[in-house]
Amino acid sequence: MIHLGTSGWYYDHWTGSFYPEELDKAGWLSFYAEQFGSVEVNASFYRLPSKKMVAGWHDRTPEDFVLTFKGSRVVTHRKKLQAVGGYLETFYDRIELAGNKCGAILWQLPPWMERDDSLLQSFLEKLHGDIQQAVEFRHRSWFTPAVYDLLEEHGVALCIVSAPDLPLQVETTASFAYIRWHGSTAWYSSRYTRHELQRWADIIRNLPVQDVYGYFNNDYNGHAPENCRQLQRLLR
């Protein structure tokens, strides 16, 4: 199953290009869920969502809709993956309200965090094995076979990243794949061409896994939903 969407849905600058001008913000998620079958919840990175918020996201989306959650920056950026056991449990407890709509969790490491295998090992050991999880690296030192092996040992996916200054590594280290498109020539603001998206459609078709999660994070000027729609058509 291929789950495509965007990284977040709550963007004022999508009004007009994606959301109808007359649509109230309270209706954005429901409208979004009519266009795409999944979303990467970006808000959970910035603050711990309340149970009421998660339940609301669940209730305002179709039965077959898939919510993936971006792990808290407290874990990745502030605590730097250290002494995070208690906070992880709280995070898991909150997103439990997503029920069967919860697809995966993405842990995005900061760009200044360099490779540290023992630190990564310790963090991976704390993750719950009953939910699909992926790690996105932003520092080049992490892109090495030894790290991929470590992820594979724990059944955690290497996030396949499309970004201007990071290497494209199409590696599957889990029973599913997780892809993020940040922009081909500029972070968050460049639009993917049809040729680039056709290449990605071919990559996705050739991945040796059944489940694929893919999210466009080039939100500027409504490029993300536009590119997501284009890729959906190419994969039909």
Image (cartoon, grey):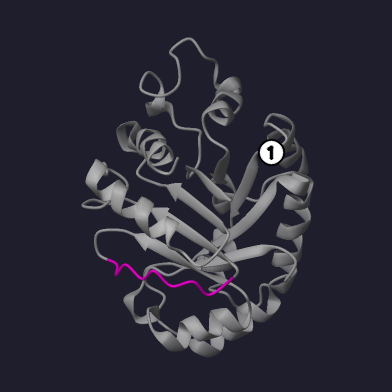
**Residue 126, x across and y down, in percent:** 70, 76
The correct choice, above or below, for 55 with respect to 94 in the image is above
Q: Would residue 7 be counted in the magenta stretch?
A: no
Q: Looking at this view, is 4 or 30 the one in front?
A: 4
Q: Number of numbered discs present? A: 1
Q: Would residue 168 be counted in the magenta stretch?
A: yes
Q: Looking at this view, is 122 or 80 the one in front?
A: 122
Which quarter of the picture shows residue 62?
Answer: top right
Q: Which residue is mark 1?
A: 64
Q: Which residue appears at 53% of the width and 53% of the height?
A: 213
Q: Which residue appears at 71% of the width and 41% of the height?
A: 54
- Which quadrant holds the C terminus? top left
Dot 1 lies on which element? loop
Q: Which residue appears at 59% of the width and 72% of the height?
A: 156
Which quarter of the picture shows residue 209?
Answer: bottom right
Q: Looking at this view, is 109 or 63 the one in front?
A: 63
Residue numbers of the magenta segment: 166-174
**Residue 150, x across and y down, in percent:** 54, 85
The correct choice, above or below, for 189 with respect to 59 in the image is below
Query: Which residue type does callout 1 highlight?
Result: Asp
